[in-house]
């Protein structure tokens, strides 16, 4: 497998998951939207995964599920009963559909206004804080008294949440302000696989 990533993005999630599998893989840093990368992934975004002769794979949650089922011995999923599977899929959908988009106005404020005035762009960015707090509060509830999001065990949902929760360091209310999230993040930061992936991407 070959993972295409850019530092600071949610591509950190499958990078961690691959570390957890113990399998051999490659990781290549790319420039988002560059001409060379568009030849590999026409969407120009990360993560992307290449596995053998299969077409390029995209979308973080789908790639994470692919890693999970490809390496069953790593035990990065949940029990096979319908409710357990739903809980994992629901959590991944929350991270993709609610958590990630909450940060878009913060990181890409000019996309959300027709004005070019600094004040208007700053207003968009500040408006994002309430949405970010909303999803962080939900994440706090998901973690409850544990250090894993789903099923009381390590799953592919954990690195996905970890990768994006790191972004709150740039907001007025960072992850350290949410007690359960803080416990989760500190446990992840102590994990050897997480450390290996972050080191490979030049993150701290």
Image (tube, rainbow, N blue to C red):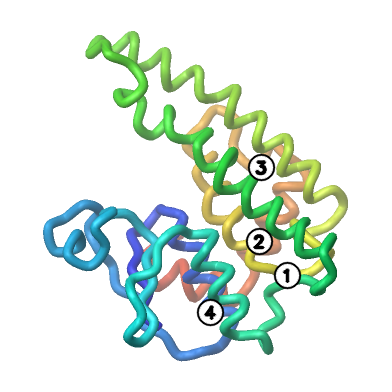
Q: CB of mark 1 within 8 Å of CB of mark 2?
A: yes
* Residue wearing tag 4: 19
* Residue wearing tag 3: 176
Q: Residues under labels 2 and 4: Cα distance?
A: 13 Å
| Nearer to me, 150 or 53 | 53
Crowd class of label 2 (few under 14; some 14 to 19; many from 20; radius 10 Å): many
Q: Is residue 138 above or below residue 28?
A: above
Q: Is residue 9 left or right of residue 92?
A: left
Q: Residues under labels 2 and 3: Cα distance?
A: 17 Å
For image coordinates 83% across by 57% down, the residue present is 146
Q: Name the N-terminal-most of marks 4 and 3.
A: 4
* Residue wearing tag 2: 158
Q: Residues under labels 1 and 2: Cα distance?
A: 7 Å
Q: Name the N-terminal-most of marks 2 and 3.
A: 2
Q: CB of mark 4 within 8 Å of CB of mark 3?
A: no
Q: Residues under labels 4 and 3: Cα distance?
A: 25 Å
Residue 79: give x, y in percent of width and height.
81, 73
Residue 180: give x, y in percent of width and height.
78, 47
Report the disc number at residue 154: 1
């Amino acid at each position: 497998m070959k993972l295409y990533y850019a530092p600071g993005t949610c591509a950190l999630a499958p990078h961690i998951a691959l570390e957890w599998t113990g399998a051999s893989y490659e990781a290549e840093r790319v420039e988002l939207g560059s001409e060379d990368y568009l030849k590999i992934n026409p969407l120009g975004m990360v993560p992307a995964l290449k596995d053998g002769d299969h077409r390029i794979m995209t979308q973080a949650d789908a790639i994470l599920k692919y890693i999970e089922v490809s390496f069953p011995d790593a035990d990065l999923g949940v029990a096979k009963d319908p409710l357990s599977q739903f809980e994992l899929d629901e959590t991944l959908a929350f991270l993709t559909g609610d958590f990630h988009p909450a940060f878009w106005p913060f990181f890409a404020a000019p996309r959300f206004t027709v004005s070019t005035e600094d004040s208007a762009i700053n207003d968009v960015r500040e408006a994002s804080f309430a949405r970010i707090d909303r999803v962080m509060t939900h994440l706090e509830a998901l973690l409850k008294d544990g250090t894993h999001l789903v099923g009381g065990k390590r799953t592919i949902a954990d690195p996905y949440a970890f990768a994006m929760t790191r972004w709150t360091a740039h907001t007025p209310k960072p992850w350290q302000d949410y007690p359960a999230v803080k416990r989760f993040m500190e446990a992840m930061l102590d994990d050897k696989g997480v450390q290996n992936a972050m080191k490979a991407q030049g993150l701290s």
